[in-house]
Image (cartoon, rainbow, N blue to C red):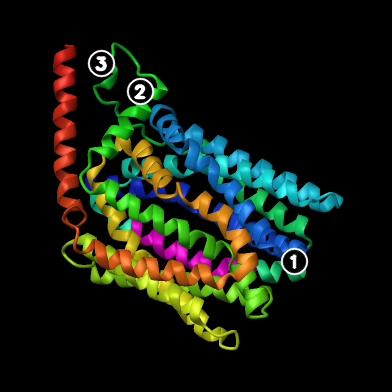
């Protein structure tokens, strides 16, 4: 075996051992989430309850995501992932007990979703930032494609699996399975090493290890000084304000408007997942346009068309809504894949925890407000209105962004930005010396 083959074998074993455990945990969590949302839907039938539950799950990431990213960049990412996965497993175990004992109440869901959200707030950036250190740069696009495809497969498999398990098992049994899959994800982390990034010159320039707040501020400066990024984030924030409530209220659209049951809801989730798989495979074969941002914006327009079709579908033509959500799913990796590649290529590894959580927090900042408004509005005028508004917004903003130079040159600006940041870090090092 050559040295090149040995290095390839080493990173593949290290990364995919952890990755495989994470996939078990994801499918366990998705099945448990499906069962929990359906329980809320059948127990309360309230759009406000569903929107509030989602709001509780989103708030920690929006409010404290940048601090979580700073903790990830400062701490041991392997230990952070173990603790985060452990918190999710503990929440699932508590759910299992509450359902088993017959004490489950709606307000318990809020507490559990809050705990799971806090765990995910640390786990996602830790895993995401560690990937670029475990995987060779030339393999990152391939790994991203695998992640997109796997996400779509899980979206296809987990809803019907959740519906099947609901018919075969009590709810506490499904929650117990979530505990088992979380344990499978945690186990490899005790044995597989995850490399740590080197810290830049900020510690030298400040006379020691910077404070958590200094790290957060450094991340804010990094993001705000990237030309075009804040415009793109503003667009994403407005779209999230409209789109997230729509898809959160999908169970009510299926049950109240289309007159469906858990099986039909599973088909909608599976249609979304099938679209993501096909979109991810298409992107991996096609590669997109030379200018990645063009590919991404076309994906945004396509997502808008699919979402609009769902909102305009008559109640007797459920199959049309199924096609609409499949189109939206197909366009999702077309929209997100190129952006992911742009950000990962232009962001230094030791900044990725902060940068990606900041981007996520800023993009999702308006979603809680959308959730708070969506419930009462949907109860009053129907869920379809959110799909219509979200679809139209995607189409108009995606098309409009094609004529904004700062967004169209986001990739070139990002590469220049990385060079400038490296030069500034070097100047700080020399000045401190």
Image vertical order of residue 148 relative to residue 410, above or below: below
Q: Is residue 394 left or right of residue 271?
A: left
Secondary structure type for disc 1? helix
How far apart marks 1 and 2 lie (CA) works out to 47 Å
Residues 227 and 262: in front is 227
Range covered by the magenta-colored residues:
144-161
Q: Earlier in the sequence, mark 2 or mark 3?
A: 3
Residue shown at the point (68%, 43%) measured from the top left: 111
Image vertical order of residue 401 relative to residue 78, above or below: below
How far apart marks 2 and 3 lie (CA) works out to 13 Å
Q: Which mark is residue 204?
A: 3
Secondary structure type for disc 2? helix
Report which residue position mark 2 lands on: 214
Residue shown at the point (36%, 31%) measured from the top left: 196
Badge 1 crowding class, 10 Å Cα cut-off, few under 14, some 14 to 19, many 20 or more, is: some
Q: Is residue 34 left or right of residue 65?
A: right
Q: Earlier in the sequence, mark 3 or mark 1?
A: 1
């Amino acid at each position: 075996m050559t040295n090149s083959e040995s290095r390839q074998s080493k990173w593949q074993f290290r990364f995919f051992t952890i990755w495989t455990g994470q996939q078990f945990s994801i499918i366990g969590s998705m099945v448990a989430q499906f069962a929990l949302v359906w329980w809320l839907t059948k127990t309360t039938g309230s759009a406000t309850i569903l929107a509030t539950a989602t709001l509780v799950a989103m708030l920690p990431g929006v409010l404290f995501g940048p601090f979580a990213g700073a903790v990830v960049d400062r701490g041991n990412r392997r230990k952070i992932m173990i603790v985060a996965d452990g918190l999710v497993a503990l929440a699932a175990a508590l759910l299992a007990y509450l359902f088993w004992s017959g004490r489950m109440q709606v307000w318990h869901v809020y507490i559990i979703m809050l705990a799971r959200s806090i765990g995910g707030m640390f786990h996602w950036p830790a895993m995401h930032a560690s990937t670029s250190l475990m995987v060779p740069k030339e393999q990152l696009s391939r790994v991203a494609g695998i992640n997109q495809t796997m996400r779509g497969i899980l979206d296809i498999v987990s809803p019907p699996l959740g519906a099947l398990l609901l018919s075969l098992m009590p709810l506490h049994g499904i929650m117990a399975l979530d505990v088992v899959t979380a344990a499978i994800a945690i186990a490899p982390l005790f044995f597989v090493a995850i490399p740590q990034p080197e810290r830049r010159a900020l510690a030298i320039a400040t006379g020691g290890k910077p404070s958590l707040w200094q790290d957060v501020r450094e991340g804010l400066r990094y993001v705000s000084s990237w030309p075009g990024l804040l415009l793109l984030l503003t667009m994403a924030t407005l779209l999230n304000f409209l789109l997230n409530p729509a898809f959160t209220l999908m169970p009510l659209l299926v049950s109240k408007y289309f007159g469906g049951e858990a099986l039909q809801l599973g088909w909608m989730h599976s249609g979304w997942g099938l679209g993501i798989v096909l979109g991810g495979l298409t992107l991996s074969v096609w590669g997109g346009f030379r200018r990645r941002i063009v590919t991404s914006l076309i994906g945004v327009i396509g997502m808008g068309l699919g979402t609009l079709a769902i909102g305009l579908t008559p109640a007797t033509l459920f199959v049309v809504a199924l096609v609409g959500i499949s189109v939206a799913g197909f366009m999702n990796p077309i929209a997100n894949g190129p952006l992911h590649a742009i950000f990962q290529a232009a962001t230094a590894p030791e900044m990725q925890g902060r940068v990606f959580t900041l981007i996520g927090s800023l993009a999702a900042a308006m979603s809680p407000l959308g959730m708070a408004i969506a419930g009462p509005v949907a109860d009053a005028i129907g869920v379809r209105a959110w799909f219509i508004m979200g679809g139209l917004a995607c189409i108009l903003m995606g098309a409009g962004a094609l004529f904004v130079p700062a967004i169209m040159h986001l990739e070139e600006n990002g590469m220049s930005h990385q060079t400038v940041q490296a030069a500034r870090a070097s100047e700080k090092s020399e000045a401190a010396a």
